[in-house]
Image (cartoon, grey):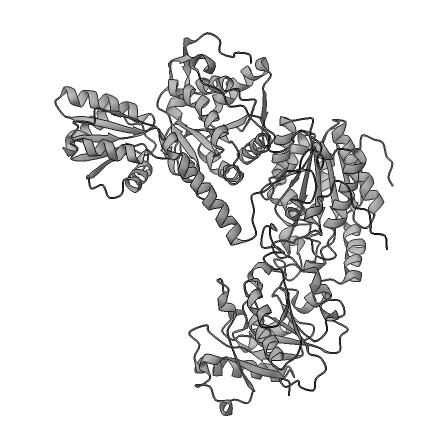
Amino acid sequence: MVAPATPKSWYLPSKPHKFCPGCGHGIVLKALGETIDELDIQDKTIFGCDIGCSLLAWDFFACDSTQTHHGRTTPVMVGIKRARPELIAIGYMGDGGGYSIGSQHLLNAAVRNEKVTLILVNNTNYGMTGGQMAPTTLPGQKTETSPFGRDPELTGYPTKGPEFISELTPDGAYVARATVSKYKQLRRFLRNALRNQIEGNGFSFVEVLSTCPTNWRTNAQQTWHFLEDEMEQYFTVGELKTPFGKGDK
Amino acid sequence: MQKVIGETKKAFLTGNEAIAWGCLAAEAEIMFGYPITPQNEIMHYWTRLAPKYGKNFLQTEDEISAGFTVCGALQTGLKAFTATAGPGNVLMQEPFGMAEAMRLPFFAIIQQRGGPSSGTVIYSQQEVSLTAHGGNGEGHRIVYSTANHQELYDYTIKGFNTAWKYRFPTFLLGDGYQAKMREPLEMYDPSDRGIEIIKPFPLIGLEGHIGEDREPQHLRNIYSLEEELYDVVLKYDSEYDSIKAELVEFSEMQCEDAEIIIISHGVVSRAAEDAVKALRAQGIKAGCFRPITLRPFPREQLLAVIDKSNAKKMLIAESAMGQLERIVKYEIYGQTLPVETLFMPGVGIIDYDLINKVKSII
Amino acid sequence: MWVTEQNVARVVEAYVGEYASGKSEMAINRALELKNQGRQVTLVDLDTVEPFYTLRPLQDKLENLGVNLICLSAKDSFGLGETGAMLNPKARWALRHEGDIILDIGYGIHGAKTLNLVEGANESEELKILLVINYTRPMTNSRERIKEYIKSFDRIDGIIANTHLANETTVEIIKKGNTEIAAVAEENNLPVVYMAVDIRLAEEVNQHEFEIPIKFINRYMPEAIWS
């Protein structure tokens, strides 16, 4: 049997990783690891993670890494990049950290066109705290804090991050939404987002639609169904803003 | 290193300006800040001076962001700082907590204003508890309470060094009066006074190839088990305990034969010194004691001063409702000298207030 | 009867119920009961809502008693951070283990849907889903509320009446609570498999006063500080 190749930028002592079976984080982090390898930026990458399941990546990479507070990864990465522009600052967060408690940071970093790369994993709920409603929870979706299904009349509609960020950012920014169901596209979007930082063009943001079978209480088939037939229908996958010209349809 | 100040000379400054110059003299590299009175002129002068010396500034979206951008910059080894006040100090407790947990050399200037809530933008000594013991932990912090513009300059330089040497969050605790008052001070280049500026160093973004020259750095502030955190906190506490003796600072005036000792800090201690002089001129044996470090507190020193005095009473005076008093009483627990208090929350205390109070209690 | 399984090939039971209804206590007692009959037992911690407040502190004790435990151990969780909605990957394949399987399901609005995470659980013919009810818990403290609560589950195979009020439990509290639970069970055509009674009350509670079989249980969970 041939074992799948492990990215060079993975930190092996922390493997196997700590995510639940079927969790999409592993796919995102594999794509990110391969992209770091491809762009040869391991030694100058600073990987920052939020609170929430993204926290479990605090020692995932053989890159200098720092773990912050809930929602505060964006300002920490901004501080790092402002202090040492030669470093590649990658912030890694969930939908709660990015769109809820840290939304003012995300919004203002985008407006200022901060030259950092932020990766936001959207799994439609707060996984680590036990499956509560997130800004991205779909209408009707049941969570621990929306036990009868999310009612948009009471709690609004799901946050569409890339859509508002692409409106806020000036030229030079890169904004995309990927999904763990389309790995090659995910890799391409991450490559573009990091290339954009390396070239110093502007803010780079990739939301990744991801899976959370533990909190969705879904088996493999149901998990994939929710991702492809529910989430990807609501959240349009693709590049919303790119300095590199349209390559993806 | 280019000397920022050049030849030592007397200058006439507002307090906030003195701090901005002190930051330059301390070789600070970048300020992250958010506007709030009464600290604004620190930002104003830093932003005017910074480009001339190749320094940077970022106005963030709020104090939370200002604090966390400082945390990020510090981790990469850049001498970053911020300044705030009142409700901004409340918001910054979160990043101060991260600095405490990750032992980041965080130096911040706090210019106290009235509280609670928005209070006043003018003056108080009501941010003592928050600054010295804030956050959701043990308050392993170092707090210098200054009294005049020379000290604002001196302790800004010292504060950076303390932060980078010991890596506990370090604060210069001023107030709106000190921020806005103007008075002469001597500005000097630290090297002319034999003060060595501690060079910053990175915790992440290190040199060398990972896996060949070095291991990757993984910094964190969260632990999953009670016992893990317990060990970390005990370690921090013992380190903090071991440096207390070299950190504590205080000043004392004519306590030796004093029958009453006035205890105050910050700008109020100036009134206390004037009051002691006036009371002595009227034949009343008064003395005064001032903790310069509110945390760690000069406990042994205050006990020794009380011991060798003839004091029958002490008077604790502050522009707050007992924030200093609580610290003093805790620190000198067991000492039986009767305590009188003069609390004027959010209001300045002058020598006249103290003289009248002393006369009414002896 | 349910509780004697000398002749049963394999016991697969999932314990569901309200937060703090006694699921883990029932599951542990059951696992040890089976173990004492000389059977091979695997106890699986499937609490994904509060996984750091479950069986972890009892791990060594249960393993020393011969129960195979699948949970997040202290060692596994080193550096994990927060409470964590975490699932030990082994839990997914729990039914592949030989011997009896006791699944301790956490509380939460998804109820027994957590079993979707265990490969083969929903197809298993051996699986029994047991609902633990403590009448002193506010969400299940009346017939109406119990009825409503049962309705939130797609499938229940039996009920365990576990009315207790910690150290203040009295025979009267048990009698009143379990009578109400039994009445609702009957209405829903569900068997009350047994009523659990703290063994410290063994002398005060007589089987002949109750129609439901009594099972005396030891309390293990108080060894975890938060219980």
Quarter holding the N terminus of chain C? Answer: bottom right
* Outermost residue to the bottom: C208
* Outermost residue to the left: B283
Q: Nearer the viewer, residue C16 or C153?
A: C16
Image spot of residue A125 (x, y percent): 67, 53
- Taking the image as shown, residue B157 lies to the left or right of residue B297, namely right
Give the quarter of the image for residue B254.
Answer: top left
User: Is C207 placed above or below B95 here?
Assistant: below
* Outermost residue to the front: B212
Q: Nearer the viewer, residue B70 or B117?
A: B70
User: Is A21 placed above or below C211 here?
Assistant: above
Give the quarter of the image for residue C17.
Answer: bottom right
Q: Nearer the viewer, residue B221 or A230?
A: B221
Residue C147 seen by the camera = no
Image spot of residue B52 (x, y percent): 58, 13
The number of discs equals: 0
Residue A195 seen by the camera = yes
Give the quarter of the image for residue B48.
Answer: top right
Image spot of residue A169 (x, y percent): 72, 32
User: Is A241 placed above or below B17 here?
Assistant: below
Image spot of residue B23 (x, y percent): 49, 20
Q: Nearer the viewer, residue B199 or B183?
A: B199
Query: What residue do we see at 54% from left, 15% from top?
Result: B49
- Taking the image as shown, residue B144 lies to the left or right of residue C119, namely left
